[in-house]
């Protein structure tokens, strides 16, 4: 796919999200608030202050994920300048996920070449559809790298797998807006 098309697809998933979040066991509840509908995903993730859910991979039961590294990567790659056009599902790595690779908001722009950083982000985005937590089990979703993401439960944990042999635990579902839904994950799925 041409780079511009991939970037357009990714922005549809990553811009203009409205804040709402549920745990893996709750049914999605659409919450529309005027102030939040005017806020992009970057701002929402930078200011994320949800109540902590206990999840299998948390360092403590009070763990609340942070997203400064992802928001920095989105700023660096220029994805913020593209308009959101369609529905999308995104699997959003936490700061802790990036730190496993020695990456953080301060070095993400210099540690990885720009083009590869764009491909990494594209590997986490499915354009054209909103797939909520209750529908993720056994899903096979075409992502923006032209490969597929597969979701299944392993030992009671909902996980996402990419075509490159990477996997991540889905630690929170249904962070959403009018044009998309994001699911928080505990690993960065880096194409190889």
Image: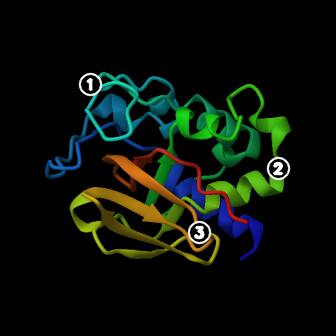
Q: Secondary structure at mark 1?
A: loop
Given this view, does label 2 or label 1 mark the residue nearer the observer? 1
Reply above or below: 34 against 134.
Answer: above
Residue visible at 58% across and 50% down in the picture:
188
* Between 63 and 84, the one nearer to me in the picture: 63
In front of the other: 16 or 149 = 149
In this view, the residue farthest toward the front is 155
Q: Residue at x 53, y 61 (%)?
A: 125
Q: CA distance from mark 2 to mark 3?
A: 22 Å
Residue 8 x/y as whole percent? 63, 61
Describe residue 179's horizontal placement relative to residue 40 as left or right. left
Q: Tag 2: Cα neighbours inside 10 Å, few (<14), some, or many (≥20)? A: some
* Badge count: 3
How packed mark 1 is, by other alpha carbons closer than 10 Å (few <14, some 14-19, many 20 or more), is few
Q: Earlier in the sequence, mark 3 or mark 1?
A: 1
Are there few (<14), some (14-19), or many (20+) residues within 10 Å of tag 3? few
Which quadrant would residue 102 be assigned to in this image? top right
Note whether 52 is above or below 137 in the view shown. above
Residue at point 44% right, 33% down? 39
Residue 172 percent location from the top left of the image: 32, 44
Return the residue at label 1. Answer: 51
Disc 2 to disc 1, C-alpha distance: 34 Å
Q: Give the foreground label among 3 and 1.
A: 3
Which numbered disc, 2 or 1, marks the residue that appears first in the sequence?
1
Question: Within the image, what quadrant is residue 101 found in?
Answer: top right
- With 95 as the anchor, is 151 left or right in this view? left
For residue 133, which quarter of the picture? bottom left
* Residue placed under numbered mark 2 in the picture: 114
Give the spatial CA distance, label 3 vs label 1.
32 Å
Q: Is the Cβ of the residue at disc 2 closer than 8 Å to that at disc 3?
A: no
Residue 165 tag number: 3
- Whichever of labels 2 and 3 marks the residue nearer the N terminus, that label is 2
């Amino acid at each position: 796919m041409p780079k511009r098309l991939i970037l357009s697809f990714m922005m549809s998933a990553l811009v203009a999200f409205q804040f709402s979040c549920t745990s893996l066991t709750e049914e999605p509840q659409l919450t529309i608030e005027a102030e939040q509908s005017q806020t992009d995903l970057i701002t929402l993730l930078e200011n994320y202050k949800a109540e902590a859910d206990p999840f299998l991979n948390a360092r403590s039961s009070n763990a609340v994920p942070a997203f400064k590294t992802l928001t920095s990567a989105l700023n660096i790659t220029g994805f913020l300048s593209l308009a959101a056009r369609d529905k999308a599902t995104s699997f959003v790595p936490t700061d802790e996920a990036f730190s496993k690779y020695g990456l953080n908001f301060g070095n993400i722009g210099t540690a990885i070449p720009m083009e590869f950083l764009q491909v990494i982000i594209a590997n986490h985005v499915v354009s054209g559809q909103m797939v909520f937590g209750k529908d993720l089990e056994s899903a096979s979703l075409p992502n923006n790298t032209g490969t597929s993401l597969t979701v299944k439960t392993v030992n009671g944990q909902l996980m996402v797998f990419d075509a490159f042999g990477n996997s991540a635990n889905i630690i929170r579902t249904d962070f959403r807006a009018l044009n998309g839904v994001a699911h928080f994950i505990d690993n960065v799925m880096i194409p190889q």
